Image (cartoon, grey):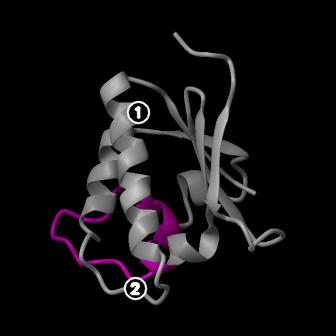
Amino acid sequence: MGTGKMIENKKYYEGYEGEPEFIIRYGEYSLHIWDGYMTDIFGKPNIVEKGWSGFTRDYNEMINCYDDNNIEFSIDPKEYKEDAEQYQGKIFDYEETGEVLKNLISALEKAEKKGLEVIVQIL
């Protein structure tokens, strides 16, 4: 049972106010990420035989959560977590991006385990 109080983790957006903000929300938790970190992770995708999925597909094809017509988009936490996991160990342009990726995966894993709907917004 929830407390009714939102927990907002804005650590990865602080200092970037006014720039695009990527928000992942489930239950009473939200993770706010500067879009530059998301670009650092998913902007240079790995080539996979089965094709892109999750954030990689959405980012590079500008669909689903990256479609300009979507104010918010519900995602499958398992699919998007598995996609994000393939970038673990990658060398990123920003020092903090590895930590952002770890927290993104953790948030999706928690939502998946709890069976919660995950909503993504880009503001």
Residue sticking out furthest to the top: 1
Q: Which residue is mark 1?
A: 111
Quadrant of the rendered image containing residue 6: top right
Badge 2 marks a residue whose secondary structure is loop
Q: Which residue is mark 2?
A: 92
The CA distance from mark 1 to mark 2 is 26 Å
Magenta segment boundaries in residue numbering: 40-61
Query: How crowded is the residue under tag 1: few (<14 C-alpha within 10 Å), some, or many (20+)?
Result: many
Which disc, if any, is residue 23? none
Mark 1 / mark 2, whichever is N-terminal: 2
Give the residue type that dot 2 points to.
Phe
Horizontal and vertical percent for residue 73? 59, 42
Q: Is residue 73 magenta?
A: no
> Which residue lies at the image location 68% right of the left edge and 17% below the top edge?
4
Using the image, determine if residue 114 lies above or below residue 35.
above
Using the image, determine if residue 41 lies above or below residue 71.
below
